[in-house]
Image (cartoon, grey):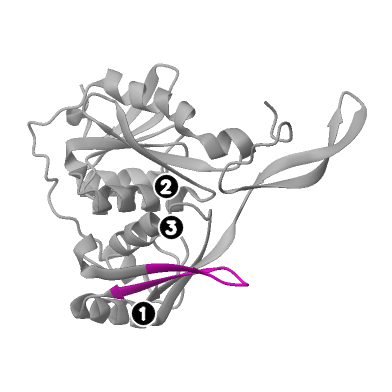
Amino acid sequence: MNAGEGFFAPAGASRLPAARWREGVCEDGAELVAEEVPVALVYNGISHAVMLASPLDLEDFAIGFSLGERIVRSARDIYGLEVEEGAHGIAIEMRIAGGAMMRLKETRRARTGRTGCGLCGVESLACFEDESFDPPRDGPAVRFDADALHRAMAAMAARQELHHATGAVHAAGWAGRDGELRCVREDVGRHNALDKLVGALARDGIDTAAGFAVVTSRASFEMVQKAARAGIPLLGAISAPTALAVQLAQQAGLTLAGFVRGGRHVLYSHRERLS
């Protein structure tokens, strides 16, 4: 079914008037278009960031963003969470622990602005270099099978309802060691999709080191950063990584695989973890 055909519009999509040009003929109709809304992340009454995101799984997004930005150390540091829709966007109001709020205030002093990128807004290159990770929790004995990696990536297509309808969103998924997808999240932003995935895993109490993540995007620095901070030992991307992403993956002890598609992949770091 084409995006403009039928009557079903999945959550996160709107049907808008459009004109189709096909083989020299123009036809008036409608198309399903992915929604993108401003989402404000508010901590203890203080607005910290405004992101453009798909209006889906916003509680997962708030938790994953908070963990990825190291505002909270665990989901338990978030005492309350409310999603409020307004005339100009959506606000996610969170009540967080006192220690987390102190860290947030320190972060706000060091940064002038934020986007989905892991570096945008830092005031100096020294902030970039001050990145550290705990040793990988899975240990050297844990291995993943290459077939499991490809099984998970191949299964992503069937779980991308919003992308099938609009063709405009990314997805991030988490699979167990057998390659079976346990959780998938979609968003117009690849960073947001991964944040939502991390948040969903945290809410369900899933041990991120017991499986791996796959993403339908390139593997940029910030994608590797988010995965490593979440304790995910293996990240598979359908497209290419950047050199900085490879450098960070090596430093963080994360196995990074790119071009995971069509029965092939390229390993860029810690290849010993993938058989």
Task: Tell me the CA gap for discs 2 and 3.
Answer: 23 Å
- For the question of whether residue 208 can be seen, the reply is yes
> Dot 1: few (<14), some (14–19), or many (≥20) neighbours within 10 Å?
some
**Depth-wise, is mark 2 or mark 3 nearer the camera?**
3
Question: Residue 11: horizontal and vertical position, in percent?
Answer: 56, 46
Question: Residue 154: horizontal and vertical position, in percent?
Answer: 42, 23
Give the residue type that dot 2 points to.
Ser
Question: Which one is earlier in the sequence, the residue at label 2 or at label 1?
Answer: 1
Give the residue type that dot 3 points to.
Leu
Question: Residue 40: horizontal and vertical position, in percent?
Answer: 48, 70
**Depth-wise, is mark 2 or mark 1 nearer the camera?**
1
Residue to which mark 1 is pinned: 108
Task: Tell me the CA gap for discs 1 and 3.
Answer: 22 Å
Say which quadrant the N terminus sits in.
top right
Give the residue type that dot 1 points to.
Arg
Name the residue rendered at 50%, 42% in the picture.
Answer: 170
Name the residue rendered at 61%, 52% in the picture.
Answer: 35
Question: Which one is earlier in the sequence, the residue at label 2 or at label 3?
Answer: 3
Q: Is residue 13 left or right of 205 when viewed as pictured?
A: right
Magenta stretch, overall SS: strand
Question: Which one is earlier in the sequence, the residue at label 1 or at label 3?
Answer: 3
Residue to which mark 3 is pinned: 58
On residue 220, the disc is 2
Residue bounds of the magenta highlight: 82-95
Above or below residue 99? Residue 144 is above
